[in-house]
Image (spheres, coloured by chain):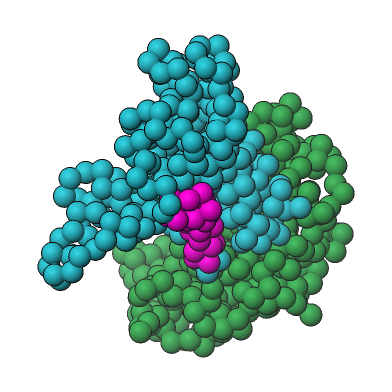
Amino acid sequence: MSLYTVARDDFTNARRSFVVLGVIGVFTLMVALIVGLDSGHHPDLYRALFDVSFFLFLVFPIIIAPLAYLSITGDRSSGAITFSMGLPNSRAEYVFGKLLSRLGVALAAVLVGMAVALAIAFATYTNAPDLVRFGKFTLITLLFSFSFIGIFVGISATTANRSRAMLGVFGAYFLLVPFWFGFLPVVGLPALLNTASDLLGVTISESTTGLIRSLSPATSYLFGTEMVYSGVVDSYPMIQQNFGETPDKFYMRFWFNSLVMFVWGAGSMLVGYLSFRRSELG
Amino acid sequence: MPAIETTGLTRRFDELVAVDALDLSVAEGEVFGFLGPNGAGKSTTINILLGFLDPSEGSATVLGHDATRDSRAVRRRIGLLPEGFAPYENLTGREHVRSAIETKDADDDPDELIARVGLDAEAARREAGGYSKGMTQRLALAIALVGDPDLLILDEPSSGLDPKGAKLLRNLVREEAADGTTVFFSSHVLGQVEQVCDRVGIMNEGRMTAVDTIDNLRTRIDAESVVEADVETVPDTESIAAVEGVREVTTLPGRVRIACTTPAAKMPALRALDSAATVTDIAIEDASLEALFEEYTGDSDADAPETAAAETAAPASGGDAA
């Protein structure tokens, strides 16, 4: 049970520092704040969840970055790794033990935050919260946290250098969140696709652009929340504007979006593990 | 079967040759002192034995397992005190020991091990991030002892230990050795290993410059002594240097130093000096083990006694890594 021991030690060590409390606290506070404030404007919780999803899309990877980016790099630079790796642990047990522990914290943050949000919703919203929609939203948010924890721990497994790990994590964030979604003007994947199509003299259809955009785990998270609003898309202009015209696109389907998020998380972990397995310690 | 065996073990870091064609054999049940100044290549060698680093050339086996390919099997049977051990800051000392016991599937009592290394029971329940260097080192020792290992690899175990801790360490090494455990004890200070080790290997600049038993080293030391004589005028020293057993004659204004490799050479050397100059005073000093160590690890390679069991025939220049 070495994997369990590595994960438990890492979790206990993190739990006693402020990082676990910090991540769960900040996440819960933000979600509670949005849900609480929205109750004054909208009668339905799912409308607040739309705001939560956009907020999490942008900010959640940043909240969990400090939790994950030093998971392995930190041990390597401090020398604490000789404790685990001097014992008969395999490289896989070490890496996946770390993942398990950090993932546990991120999932706990989501569950605690969503539970508090639900409690607030019951107390303050005009219409009783739809538990099925709420459950779907929680599920896809858990998947979202898996994808980014996997990416960040995977990056951490590839380097013994703290600043390089930080650079990698923020580079990944910039690439996968604002750049891929096209959040910033000019410096974005959609703008790049436009430029490319102009230069090549071809037209890229809107659904191709949508598909390419959905290949980031963050965009996939946003697109995947479509299932939360099934049947009520037209009730709010904001939701209608985002999901109204594309109900039949597969890249806005939960199965596809969850696959994208899973592949990013698991793939990054695999790459990180393969790199760590070959890397030299000490 | 030797507990540790390396064959032509070489490790390069870019241009630097950290370990240069090392052939080392440590017998089962032996207490081996692995000596050398900082940067001699000791930790690189140990990290290869643990599978943390790959050799550039050559191979290493530990307890019959290939250190690189079968590192986990090695780590199952050894106890390791790594150099500069850093604990998990927020785990208690006891939790570290307990995890080591779990990982090794051992049935040790953590409190017993903690008591054995002289770590206070109350301190063991505090977070290890607040430990002093000495306490951290004791904790590392407790972890190394988990699972009654066949081989203890102790990398600079005395660093940070006070004299009481160093004594406890020596006693522990003796107890483990009496139990049949092989101990591989690395240090940059000779005094810490000479009392417990059966044999020592002295490493310098990636090469083993001497491997011998402590007793043989002592014999060599006992033999080596320096006769220092004050003279009215410094004579021509050729006749003294020609005396059998005289290794080297050096002169200072008004003083002659005669280094002898056998005790019997002292009187003939003095007689030769007496007939060449007027001697006003003499003093005889015995070389220390420490001085020998310095000789093997210093820059003056050419001065090392011929009797040294040089373990390697590698070329002197190691900087030609392609």
The percent position of residue B227, horizontal first and vertical second, equals 51, 67
Position of the C terminus of chain B, as image quadrant, is: bottom left
Query: Is A277 rendered above or below residue B94?
Result: below
Residue at left offset 51%, top offset 49%:
A254
> Which chain does green denote in the image?
B
Within the magenta stretch, is there residue B58?
A: no
Between residues B235 and A117, which one lies in front from this camera angle? Answer: A117
In the image, is residue A219 above or below residue B3?
Answer: above
Give the number of marks: 0
Chain (cyan): A
Is residue A254 part of the magenta span, yes or no? yes
Percent coordinates x, y for residue B271 in the rendering: 52, 76
Nearest the viewer among B188 and B234 is: B188
Q: What is the magenta range?
A: A250-275
Instruction: Kindly tell me whether residue B50 is visible in this rendering.
Output: yes
User: Could you tell me residue A97's position as x and y percent?
Assistant: 63, 50
Q: Residue at x 42, y 47 (%)?
A: A247
A81 left or right of B231? right
Residue at position x 50%, y 13% in the image: A126
